[in-house]
Image (spheres, rainbow, N blue to C red):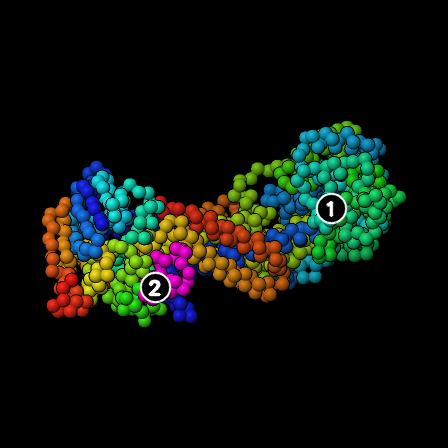
């Protein structure tokens, strides 16, 4: 008990004598630790946010997406819908992502196909089409027309949207007409009609080449039945990682990534197509091929470069580490520079810690000599020093824990992130403690007592 | 030359109040070599610091060459110390990172001396103290006696009128202490007033006069009229039979 | 410690390393900021990066902007409105600026301000690739565009070839005359937080007279720390953390350095050195070490830029980093010295 009291008193005395320096070191270590954890997470892929992968064609694919809640990316995408050039830029961006050699993307989402009631009657007459309609919306629904000023009655048909890559990867085939190809996904102008595929169940109801007028979000546009899918064609139910599939027999398949040749005046049809691209890039609607999982940062950087080329924020890949996710908008060079700064800061913190304790041990030498002379074991003198080192390092641990734990910055890999912080702090403590022990090595009582103040 | 009248100095407040000096009055003539003796806590070092302008007084008068020193501002005290006083302390107070030349040249820095003049003055001081060849060495490379000589060289490089020494031989062995004592005598003979604070009776006995302090007061004064001659004889300044 | 037979005073090594590190850090940050600005210029032309696109439809009156802009200028201190003018070869933009908005680097003259961008007389800022095509009349320079003589008020351009060198900016009224009011526009402000407000004002000022299609998005309240650690801001946050840490480390190192100067302080006091001379001596020693540290930091930075070609150093960056390093060092030394003296 007396020893504990002595230790605490010594700790208090030592801390009080150099409280300002201790606080400065604490602050430096806090910053160093947060940056070091971030950099380790980036370079060593520590702390997955949300592990979600898919296996397609023998390759590993990661889910990706952007959302309003997390950063301004989705708003930036939406903003591009306001002008024709912005829409084209968005479509070009999506196209570049789809066609990236090493990191192509596959996209799919589910969205009903709205056809005006009058046109439905024209297309299907009195035939029973309930199986093709969205569940729970078998009757006509009143909605605002694309011009936003009047309402109309529409029927919502079950539909999925998919890009060419998804169509090919899922092994879908058309038994009549043609499936999605690079050729038919590039149209001259809106009048040509956007090529769509219909499920086998539509055979006899719709024919290849038949035109369908669709009520879109911003504009009404024309589609053309390019082909009828084979019977029982399977499609993932919700997203690419879903093992459950549905049969496309009663579905319409809408293409994502259609390119329009001729310049359109108002955004109109371009907005619809660009919107499809934005939807495809939204959370969970796509997967991106990752070459080597150990080099995820290269994939992230490649995606960033595509974004930079089109002036749009890069997509966020899920399942990557916290560091890769947070730094996805930064170039590899800037991240390397930050790594250099982190290393320098860390080294400086340690050197400062060592020098401070060197000065402390030197100036308290006589006091230690007196303690030793009066029978105090060396270990008891060392413990307050070691505790002071721990005291300096502890706030860094608490701060980094708080920083990475709040609002899921650390994500589902928080345990790994905090483990990294603990590991680095532990290593720092060993170095600091080692430094103190080194300074106190070979202590000679008599020499210490003779030491002048 | 130095006159002190009823000097009082107190440290601390309330219960921790300590009266280091209580009504000290003394006078020291030019060219005198005086020792101030007393036990620990008698006020010796405080008195020396006041003499050197390092500390202010609470009350009383301190006159130097007829002019009042107490009551001067810090700037004036610094100037006084720089121009009139040479200070030597027990543990030498040399800067470890400067060589001996640089240490001795410290008082000359920024005083408008040319490099050549500084070289001349420092070399002269080192020569006088017999450590000219150690100019480029660092304090840690010298013995205690050599370090103290270097400290004395620094104290005299500007030719001050008064040398104040606080336990100059306290950290030295007897033989080395004697040689340092000899240096003080030589300086005294050259016309400098030397005031040494010591608890060593032998050191005090070698001075012309010893002032004994007890509990912040002058207890007594002892004169040693023939000490000067004896010391000069020892250092070879006087031949046997010659008088001062 | 001795180097070349000269003893290195205690604490100098730490101070030297600290200043090497801080100067390297500052050089990296200054270089990265410049590269970022240049990159931004290449990517966004003169836009901030958070500009909003919008479209006007449903009106034939080009002069409607004449009602809107004066009111907008009265309501908002800083904004930039840009309109694309259809052109075969040359990118032409009409611009209406007020206050603090991103401007391109100028070679000669000035870029637009409110009075020159919202004016009846045609005015223009040319990219430097066109500067030899101007006519000089009555002391002013003019450039012909679609039969209209525009007064050239400035030449813009960058050293490196960029889009800005091959662009033309004209005053807003002339641009709307050429492009028509029913076209797409860009709205920009320097502060991303203001853009929503300015956009809302534009929509409100047009009212029923035209359709203004602009998505402004909703403001989502997020905690400050989350915002600082978002992918949009993380790098800036880290730069600030690094700078703050290096400042703190310099304070710590300076305290330790001053502590190691105890002997010197005591000796100087013994020798009767005046306070201001003592101060000068301390500053001299400090600056010497700090200066050497900066040189080493500069050397390391040059080595880095040799290894990593994307990191480029410019002379103004070096001067700026030097000024900040030494300025910061002096301020910190002053603070620490004053603290030290107050405790002495």
Q: Is residue A261 visible to the viewer in this orientation of the structure?
A: no
Residues packed near mark 1 inside 10 Å, few (<14), some (14 to 19) or many (20 plus) = few
Taking depth in this image into account, of B237 and A319 the one nearest to the observer is: B237
For disc 1, the chain is C
Which disc, if any, is residue B238? none
> Which residue appears at 56% of the width and 43% of the height?
C227
Task: Answer left or right for B154 relative to B211.
Answer: right
Predominant SS along the magenta part: helix
Q: Position of residue A97 (x, y in %)?
A: 70, 55
Residue B140 inside the magenta-drawn segment: no
Residue under label 2? B122
Q: Position of residue A102 (x, y in %)?
A: 67, 62
- Give the magenta range: B99-124
Taking depth in this image into account, of A420 and C27 the one nearest to the observer is: C27
For disc 2, the chain is B
Q: Distance from label 2 to label 1 (Cα)?
A: 63 Å
> Which residue appears at 56% of the width and 39% of the height?
C222
> Which residue appears at 31% of the width and 47% of the height?
B77
> Which residue appears at 67% of the width and 59% of the height?
A103
Residues packed near mark 2 inside 10 Å, few (<14), some (14 to 19) or many (20 plus) = many
Which disc, if any, is residue C109? 1
Q: Mark 2 or 1, which is nearer the eye?
A: 2
Residue B113 inside the magenta-drawn segment: yes
User: Looking at the image, is C344 positioned above or below residue A434?
Assistant: above
């Amino acid at each position: 008990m007396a020893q504990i009291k002595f230790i605490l008193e010594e700790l208090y005395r030592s801390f009080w004598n150099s409280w300002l320096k201790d606080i400065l070191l604490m602050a430096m270590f806090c910053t160093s630790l947060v940056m070091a954890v971030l950099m380790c997470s980036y370079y060593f892929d520590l702390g997955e946010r949300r592990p979600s992968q898919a296996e397609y064609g023998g390759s590993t694919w990661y889910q990706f997406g952007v959302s309003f809640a997390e950063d301004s990316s989705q708003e930036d995408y939406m903003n591009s819908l306001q002008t024709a050039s912005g829409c084209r830029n968005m479509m070009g961006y999506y196209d570049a992502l789809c066609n990236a050699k090493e990191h192509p993307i596959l996209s799919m989402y589910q969205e009903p196909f709205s056809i005006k009631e009058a046109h439905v009657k024209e297309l299907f007459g009195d035939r029973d089409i309930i199986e093709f309609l969205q569940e729970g919306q078998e009757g006509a629904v009143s909605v605002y027309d694309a011009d936003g000023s009047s309402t109309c009655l529409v029927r919502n048909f079950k539909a999925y949207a998919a890009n060419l890559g998804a169509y090919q990867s899922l092994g879908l085939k058309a038994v009549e007409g043609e499936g999605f190809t690079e050729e038919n996904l590039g149209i001259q102008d809106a009048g040509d009609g956007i090529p769509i595929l219909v499920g086998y169940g539509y055979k006899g109801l719709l024919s290849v080449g038949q035109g369908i007028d669709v009520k879109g979000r911003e504009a009404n546009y024309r589609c053309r039945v390019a082909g009828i899918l084979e019977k029982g064609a399977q499609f993932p139910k919700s997203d690419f990682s879903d093992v459950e599939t549905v049969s496309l027999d009663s579905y319409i398949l809408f293409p994502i990534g259609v390119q329009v040749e001729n310049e359109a005046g108002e955004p109109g049809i371009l907005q619809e197509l660009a919107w499809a691209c934005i939807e495809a890039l939204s959370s969970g609607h796509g997967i991106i091929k990752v070459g080597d999982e150990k080099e995820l940062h290269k994939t992230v950087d490649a995606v960033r470069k595509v974004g930079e080329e089109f002036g749009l924020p890069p997509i966020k890949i899920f399942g990557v580490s916290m560091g890769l996710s947070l730094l996805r908008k930064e170039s590899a060079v800037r991240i390397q520079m930050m790594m250099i700064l982190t290393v320098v800061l860390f080294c400086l913190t340690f050197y400062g810690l060592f020098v401070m304790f060197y000065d402390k041990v030197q100036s308290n030498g006589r006091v230690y000599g007196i303690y030793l002379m009066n029978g105090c074991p060396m270990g008891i003198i060392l413990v307050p020093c070691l505790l002071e080192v721990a005291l300096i390092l502890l706030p860094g641990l608490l701060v980094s824990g708080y920083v990475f734990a709040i609002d899921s910055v650390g994500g589902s890999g928080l345990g790994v992130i905090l483990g990294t912080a603990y590991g680095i702090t532990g290593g720092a403590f060993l170095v600091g403690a080692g430094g103190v022990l080194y300074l106190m090595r070979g202590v000679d009582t008599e020499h210490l007592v003779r030491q002048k103040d | 030359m130095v006159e002190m009248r009823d000097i009082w100095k107190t440290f601390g407040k309330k219960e921790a109040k300590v009266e280091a000096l209580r009504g000290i009055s003394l006078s020291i003539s030019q060219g005198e070599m005086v020792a101030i003796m007393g036990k620990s806590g008698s006020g010796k070092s405080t008195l020396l610091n006041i003499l050197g302008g390092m500390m202010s007084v609470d009350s009383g008068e301190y006159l130097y060459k007829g002019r009042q020193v107490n009551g001067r501002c810090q700037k004036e005290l610094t100037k006084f110390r720089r121009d009139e006083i040479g200070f030597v302390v027990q543990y030498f107070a040399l800067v470890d990172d400067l060589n001996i030349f640089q240490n001795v040249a410290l008082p000359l820095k920024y005083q408008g001396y040319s490099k050549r003049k500084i070289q001349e003055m420092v070399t002269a001081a080192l020569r006088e103290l017999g450590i000219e060849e150690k100019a480029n060495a660092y304090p840690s490379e010298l013995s205690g006696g050599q370090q103290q000589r270097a400290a004395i060289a620094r104290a005299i490089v500007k030719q001050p009128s008064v040398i104040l020494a606080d336990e100059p031989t306290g950290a030295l062995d007897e033989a080395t202490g004697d040689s340092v004592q000899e240096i003080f005598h030589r300086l005294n003979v050259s016309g400098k007033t030397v005031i040494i604070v010591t608890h060593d009776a032998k050191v005090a006995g070698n001075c012309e006069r010893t002032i004994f302090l007890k509990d912040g007061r002058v207890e007594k004064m002892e004169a040693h009229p023939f000490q000067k001659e004896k010391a000069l004889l020892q250092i070879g300044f006087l031949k046997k039979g010659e008088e001062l | 410690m001795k180097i070349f037979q000269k003893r290195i005073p205690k604490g100098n090594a730490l101070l030297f390393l600290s200043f090497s590190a801080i100067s390297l850090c500052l050089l990296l940050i200054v270089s990265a900021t410049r590269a970022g600005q240049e990159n931004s210029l290449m990517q966004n032309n003169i836009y901030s990066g958070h500009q909003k696109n919008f479209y006007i439809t449903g009106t034939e009156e080009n002069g409607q902007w004449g009602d809107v802009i004066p009111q907008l200028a009265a309501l908002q201190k800083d904004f930039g409105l840009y309109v694309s003018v259809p052109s075969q070869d040359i990118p032409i933009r009409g611009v209406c600026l007020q206050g603090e908005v991103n401007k391109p680097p100028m070679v000669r003259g000035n870029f637009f301000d409110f009075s020159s961008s919202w004016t009846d007389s045609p005015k223009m800022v040319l990219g430097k690739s066109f500067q030899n095509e101007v006519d000089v009349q009555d002391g002013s320079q003019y450039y012909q565009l679609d039969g209209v003589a525009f007064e050239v008020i400035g030449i813009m351009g960058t050293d490196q070839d960029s889009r800005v060198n091959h662009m033309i900016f004209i005053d807003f009224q002339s641009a709307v005359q050429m492009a028509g009011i029913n076209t797409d526009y860009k709205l920009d402000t320097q502060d991303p937080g203001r853009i929503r407000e300015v956009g809302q004002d534009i929509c409100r000022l047009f009212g029923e007279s035209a359709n203004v299609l602009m998505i402004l998005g909703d403001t989502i309240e997020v905690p400050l720390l989350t915002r600082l650690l978002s992918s949009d801001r993380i790098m800036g946050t880290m730069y600030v953390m690094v700078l703050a840490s290096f400042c703190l480390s310099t304070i710590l190192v300076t305290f330790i350095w001053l502590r190691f100067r105890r002997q010197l302080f005591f000796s100087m006091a013994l020798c009767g050195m005046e306070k201001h001379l003592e101060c000068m001596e301390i500053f001299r020693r400090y600056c010497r070490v700090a200066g050497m540290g900066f040189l080493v930091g500069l050397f390391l930075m040059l080595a880095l830029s040799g290894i990593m070609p994307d990191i480029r150093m410019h002379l103004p960056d070096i001067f700026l980093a030097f000024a900040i390093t030494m300025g910061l060092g002096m301020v910190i030394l002053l603070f620490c010295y004053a603290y030290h003296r107050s405790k002495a």
